[in-house]
Amino acid sequence: MITLLSIMIQNINTTPRASRPDLLAILEDQGYRPTNQRRDVVSLLERKGEGFTVEEVSGELPEVGRATVYRTIKLLLKAGVLCKLALPDGAPKYIMARAEHHHHTVCVKCGTVGEFRDTTVERVLRAVGAEIPGEIVGHRMELYLVCLDCQDRPEG
Amino acid sequence: MITLLSIMIQNINTTPRASRPDLLAILEDQGYRPTNQRRDVVSLLERKGEGFTVEEVSGELPEVGRATVYRTIKLLLKAGVLCKLALPDGAPKYIMARAEHHHHTVCVKCGTVGEFRDTTVERVLRAVGAEIPGEIVGHRMELYLVCLDCQDRPEG
DNA sequence: ATAGATATTGATACAAAGTATCATTATGTG
DNA sequence: CACATAATGATACTTTGTATCAATATCTAT
């Protein structure tokens, strides 16, 4: 009954990507000026392996104004080098994007973000999109789970 | 944390029910008292065909306190008779749940919410979940599109 | 029906995640 | 260097809720 071919999952719950992009260069390519504040923000993000919130980043960069941190992260989102995802209650979380199209897992206990890629998911999304009136312009998908660490450490 | 988990699980396993649900009775079955305020809120929601925001509902019910509207909608979410979904920017929107497990489409121009159901999506999600370390407890998925009406009425 | 227990309400304050304003400062260009 | 423009930061404001808590409504047992 279940005839799933080519399930392919990569880098589950692993974060370090081989080649980090030069985020500041990406911003410059889009015509934005390389300011010290942007340097500070992207430098911090480039070292972040895990998901993060803007307030967290802002707290770690007291020398950069809160609004500027939000602004810089918004630019990176638009540039597609950051992903914004949502916890079950809708609380936002950010993580560096990978090159390939992928989706995220979020542990509902500890908030750790992982990623997975499944070509079948993409094919199904395209197939469903073809059945639906209107032009699909995007989608959102997150899997919520209890990670192995949190299973080992029951009851919080 | 625990509350989040509860909301989410209810959203996943939407309870099948009659086409015209008596929301107040559902709340009573769960041990909640049938107050006039709850009557007002569910009565309004039962007449809502489209997606809505809580502030919108609250605005239409000036005789019910804002906090109570939020509280009632939260109860309905937990009961699984409402779905909470997110626009591309994360802005929340609510809509009455259908009996079957389904997902939503949102027009990025006019905000109109639609729904679709595709068993392949469910199978893929289960299959992917089986490959991922940790116990899947829920997911979120929304398709963003430009609806036919908004395509006909290009650029505003 | 009444008393007492418990649930619910509403006003208010507060919180989290941003955005708008705008005077000041930094950056790029000729 | 001068000037135009972009960016910043402080602040206020917005949205989407949640926490508090005294007052009120509802339920239960007599």
Image (tube, coloured by chain):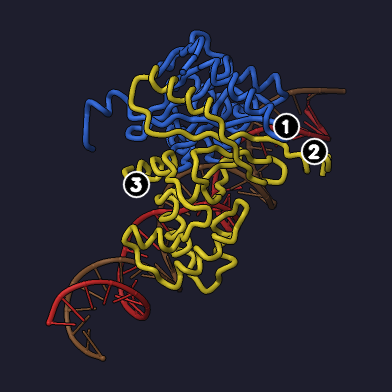
Chain colours: A blue, B yellow, C brown, D red
Give the residue type at disc 1: Glu
Residue placed under numbered mark 3 in the picture: B3
In the rendered image of this protein, does residue B91 appear above or below residue C28? below
Residue placed under numbered mark 2 in the picture: B151
- Looking at marks 3 and 2 on the same chain, the residue that comes earlier in the sequence is marked by 3
Q: Residue at x 60, y 27 (%)?
A: A76
Question: Which quadrant: the C terminus of chain A?
Answer: top left
In the rendered image of this protein, does residue A104 appear above or below residue B71? above
- State the residue in front, C11 or A27: C11
Could you tell me which chain the residue with mark 2 belongs to? B
| Total number of numbered discs in the rendering | 3
Give the residue type at disc 2: Gln
- State the residue in front, D25 or A99: D25
In the rendered image of this protein, does residue B9 appear above or below residue D26? above
Residue C4: image quadrant is: bottom left
The answer to whether dots 3 and 2 both sit on one chain is yes
Residue placed under numbered mark 1 in the picture: A135
* Discs 1, 2 touching: Cβ within 8 Å: yes
Where is residue C29 drawn, in percent x and y? Answer: 81, 23
